[in-house]
Image (cartoon, helix red, strand yellow):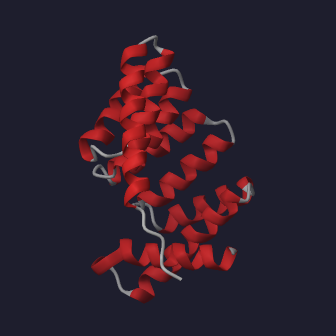
Amino acid sequence: MKKGFILFLLVIGLLVCGNNCTFAESLPKVSAIAEIGTLTINNNLEQALEKCNKALEEYPDNSELYYWRASIKGKMNNNKEALADYNKAVELEPGDPDLYVMRGICKSDLDDREGAIADFNKALELNPKNSSAYSMRACVKLDMGDFEGATKDLEMANSLFDNDEKSFKPAVQ
């Protein structure tokens, strides 16, 4: 299963790299990201952080590495440093709605509810069908006492989940 996951990440990395680099140039970066992701998922956080820091020395403009380092730091309960890395990832890839969702979650964890709402709003501006952004925004609204707004967001998230489920067609075996 781990080999399949790593191969999946390699393919995604190659697609992300696209025409900006050759296969030979992208392979070490994609491999590093795949290894960092695997280590993080398996809770080998210190090792993942070390590899991520090393990879960032070589690839300082890679938003995925900042995303992974933020994720690692968040799992280590170092949300202030995680926020700095999410900020850098967003700076490098301002059109990625998922980065705004993750940064919004981090801001919420730091009790910056207005900042979190702003990030979820930006994610929805970039992708109006982002069910995660609606769900997370609902949680923050609920925490702020905006029950009506939270209910509307949860209804929208559920609607999007339902539509995704209806459009999903499993492969014929």
Q: Please tell me which residue lies in front, 93 or 154.
A: 154
Residue 3 lies in quadrant: bottom right
Residue in the image at 37% along x and 76% along y: 15
- The answer to whether residue 133 is visible is no
Determine whether, in the image, residue 123 is placed left or right of residue 2.
Answer: left
Residue 103 rendering spot, x and y as whole percentages: 45, 39
Q: Please tell me which residue lies in front, 59 or 34.
A: 34
- The answer to whether residue 2 is visible is yes
- Outermost residue toward the bottom? 24
Residue 97 rendering spot, x and y as whole percentages: 34, 47
Q: Is residue 49 above or below residue 4?
A: above
Residue in the image at 37% along x and 60% along y: 167
- Outermost residue toward the top? 145
Where is the C terminus found, in terms of image quarters?
bottom right
Residue 109 rendering spot, x and y as whole percentages: 56, 28
Residue 41 lies in quadrant: bottom right
Q: Please tell me which residue lies in front, 51 or 102.
A: 102
Determine whether, in the image, residue 126 is placed left or right of residue 161.
Answer: left
Where is the N terminus found, in terms of image quarters?
bottom right
